[in-house]
Amino acid sequence: MDNAVKFSHPHGSVEIRLTEQGSHVTVSVEDHGIGIDPQIRPRIFDRFFHMEKEGEELYSGIGIGLSITRQVIQQHRGTLDVVSEPGKGSTFTISLLKWK
């Protein structure tokens, strides 16, 4: 959620959805911000990855948030996926098995 706010336009919105789909529960976080360039999308879950422009860091942080988040979710047999379009925003979706 922090990244959704960080990469959104000023006064933009962030939508959070919780849904139940069969044996899974999903949480989606959608922003309407800058989006993610398709060329760097495969690396956003790499440890210490930062979005840069011509060698300059665009946003502060140490670049471990998405990496750690994905690892924790995978340890719980879940998935973390992203759909993004530059200039239009991103949606990150967490899917976890339901516990009975």
Image (tube, grey):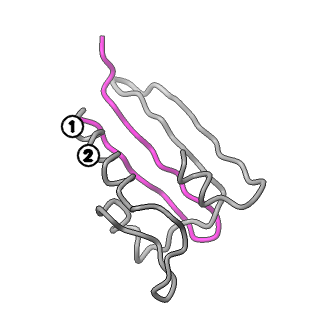
**Magenta span contains residue 8:** no
SS state under label 1 = helix
Q: Quadrant of residue 46?
A: bottom left
Which three-letter amino acid code belongs to the residue tagged 1? Answer: Gln
Query: Is mark 2 in CB contact (under 8 Å) with mark 1?
Result: yes
Residue 77 horizontal side relative to residue 61, left or right: left
Q: Quadrant of residue 72?
A: top left
Task: Work out whether residue 35 or residue 10 is closer to the camera in this orientation and state it.
Answer: 10
The residue indicated by pointer 1 is 75
Give percent across and percent down for residue 82: 44, 55
Give percent across and percent down for residue 55: 45, 86
Residue 77 horizontal side relative to residue 69, left or right: left
Which three-letter amino acid code belongs to the residue tagged 2? Answer: Gln
Task: Identify the residue at image location x=64%, y=61%.
Answer: 33
**Magenta span contains residue 87:** yes
Vertical arrangement, residue 7 with respect to residue 18, above or below: below
The residue indicated by pointer 2 is 71
Q: Which residues are magenta?
A: 77-100
Q: Residues within 10 Å of mark 2 (few under 14, many from 20)?
A: some
